[in-house]
Image (spheres, rainbow, N blue to C red):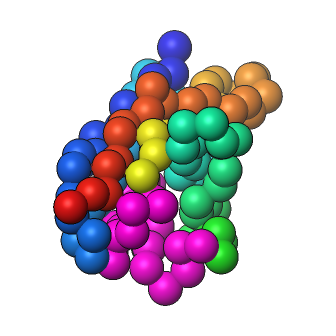
Amino acid sequence: QVQLVESGGGLVQPGGSLRLSCSASGSIFGIYVMGWYRQAPGKQRELVAAITSGGSRNYADSVKGRCTISRDNAKNMVYLQMNSLKPEDTAVYYCKAAIQGFPKDSRRDYWGQGTQVTVSS
């Protein structure tokens, strides 16, 4: 059983910063792409940033230059550093990872439960 748990969300003023963390645990043989998504009220879930096991990154245009995704493969963790936050960044942020549980298994996507980020004065 694989589990993803996010932490680090909260209330922050415009222009502030937050660092989100996501930890993967359970029966893990390999973790491939890890990413952060967000969903604001009334909107579809969207990709914020993703990082491969080799360190290649991609970002949504809306967060380029303000967010940095990183991962610690030894700890099975992924992070999202968010700076210069704006009210429109307010959303529930979800961690997603493509994980192979056992050598005989195919990789599949797992999601965390989400962490709320609210940017407001």
User: For this rendering, which residue is in front, 64 or 35?
Assistant: 64
Residue 119 appears at what percent x and percent y?
A: 31, 57
Residue 69 appears at what percent x and percent y?
A: 46, 67
Question: Quick check: 78 left or right of 46?
Answer: left
Q: Is residue 119 above or below residue 39?
A: below
Residue 11 appears at what percent x and percent y?
A: 21, 50
Quadrant in the picture for the C terminus: bottom left
The image quadrant of residue 23 is top left
Q: Is residue 90 above or below residue 40?
A: below
Q: Residue furthest top?
A: 1
Question: Quick check: 73 left or right of 28?
Answer: left
The image quadrant of residue 54 is bottom right
User: For this rendering, which residue is in front, 46 or 30?
Assistant: 46
Question: Quick check: 77 left or right of 32?
Answer: left
Q: Is residue 57 above or below residue 65?
A: above
User: For this rendering, which residue is in front, 68 or 103?
Assistant: 68
Identify which residue is drawn at 78% across, 28% down. 106
What number of labels is visible? Answer: 0
Identify which residue is drawn at 28% across, 46% down. 9
Q: Is residue 12 visible?
A: yes
The image quadrant of residue 83 is bottom left
Q: Is residue 97 visible?
A: no
Magenta-colored stretch includes residue 36: no
Magenta-colored stretch includes residue 69: yes
Identify which residue is drawn at 64% across, 24% down. 102
Q: State the extent of the magenta-drawn residues as a range.
A: 62-89
